Image (cartoon, rainbow, N blue to C red):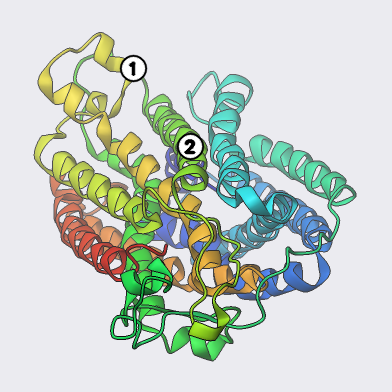
Amino acid sequence: MFTFPLLSPSLIACLKLSQTQLTTIVLAGMTSQYPIAVFVGWLIDHYGPSLCAAFGGFTFAIGYTAFAWEVDAASSDGIQVPPAVVFRLACYFLLIGLGTVFSYLSSLFAASRYFPEHIGLASGFTMALFGLSPLFLSVIATTFFMDPTTRLLNVAAFFYFLSTQSAVVNIGSSFSMHQTPLPSEPPISIVASRNADQNATEDSPLLARQLGSRSIRLLNPSVMQIIASLDFWLLAIFCVFILGTSEMIIATIGSIVLSLPPASRESPSLQHAAALQVKLISLANTMSRLIIGSLVDFTSPSATATATHESDGVYALPAKYAISRFAFLSGAALLLTCTLLWTRLSIYFQDQLWMLRYLKYKGHLAMSNQSHSVGTGLSYSAVFTVLPNLISSLWGSRDLGRNFGLMMYAPFTGTPLFSYVYALISASHTDQGVGTCKGRQCWELTISLCTATSLISLALSIILWKKWRGAI
């Protein structure tokens, strides 16, 4: 899914696809994951991850094989493909997206159930492997599937390989995934008495005096109770802006590379430029998820609560926190805001997107724009790493899969919104008869809008941080 920037130059050259058509295809895959995430989470909660892993393997095999066959057949014509071909490619990428959500959630929640006391590290390690896969696959793609004549990726051959590899891995792993019972939780809600401050004595729990009437935590609430809470909407809007912006950048980084001129004649090919951006995002994803997952476990309260002081109407979290989980969301929003602002002011050449090229081009612009891919990857992965732990703390772990899937409607809204804003603005600056937009004007306005929404997300995370200070 996240290797799509590798495909963009080949699809543009061989199929004569426009930026809007490329956006449609990649969005079909990226957004198809989210509408069924609630259903997949419910399946895992009730029947375990094994069934979902196997289904993901079969879906991958069908989607990758069909996409490869369609590209192989259309590339032989050498002309711009008709809209029907674009529609079929989008449908096949949709199947790949469905396979991704079944595979991803089955592995994520299998790890979370196996290690409930270290859900941050367990989910972070699983997500790190998921984030590392684009790096691994981009190395394979550029090593074994590049056309030596055109220096472009052989998309059909690469996807036939992915079809076999993903089917074998997912179906094989399904035999080792088993339903694991959840740790016991208090059968009633964790709340703070609204009169805690007035009735506080030396024997009253400290947590109640700290929270006062600011916070109410419902344990294992229904879907309607979650949707009715202000916390859900603040967190959802945050995810719409941060995850939507990040996935837009991930999906369009290849086009951003194509829009910029090379800094010199020694600059590498466009295909290798796009490949390196995939590697940078993948590395940032991996490192961030490992580090953030560990930090959440050791610096924030345990996700599993223990009921105490029932007579006072107060149920306290057993672990003392050092850093609020919401602080990690604030850090991700701040980092993405700085990354976008830096990108808007500094990027002028392809080489400035290359971290490794800094060894050769040591100007201040080159150093400043290395943050584009790395900053996006760090922000994106930090939010996804914290979310399972945060959702478990807010609403309990019994229906964690369902609740996590419910929150995935946020990127389902944000990703197509920001991606089509980028595509339409880029198309408005594309000259007639030219396949791709050229120049900074292709993405300047989009980056400016995303900077503003990231600032809004930062404010929302601070509101949640202050509201749950001392509890989550």
Residue kind at label 1, given as amino acid type: Leu
Q: Label 2 belongs to which residue?
A: 6
Residue kind at label 2, given as amino acid type: Leu
Q: 10 Å neighbourhood of mark 2: few (<14), some, or many (≥20)?
A: many
* Residue at image point 70% right, 40% down: 162
Q: Nearer the viewer, mark 1 or mark 2?
A: 1
Disc on res. 404:
none
* Residue at image point 76% right, 56% down: 62
Note whether residue 10 is visible.
no
* Residue at image point 59% right, 58% down: 93
Q: Label 1 belongs to which residue?
A: 356
Q: Secondary structure at mark 1?
A: helix
Identify which residue, 390 or 187, lies in the foreground.
187
Identify whether 158 is placed above or below 241: above
Q: Quadrant of the C terminus?
A: bottom left
Residue 21: image x %, image y %?
42, 59
Residue 350: image x %, image y %?
25, 29
Which mark sits nearer the N-terminus, 1 or 2?
2
Q: 10 Å neighbourhood of mark 1: few (<14), some, or many (≥20)?
A: some
Q: Secondary structure at mark 2?
A: helix
Identify which residue, 341 or 427, lies in the foreground.
341
Horizontal arrangement in the rendering, residue 163 relative to residue 333 (left or right):
right
Give the CA separation, mark 1 to mark 2: 18 Å
Horizontal arrangement in the rendering, residue 302 relative to residue 156 (left or right):
left
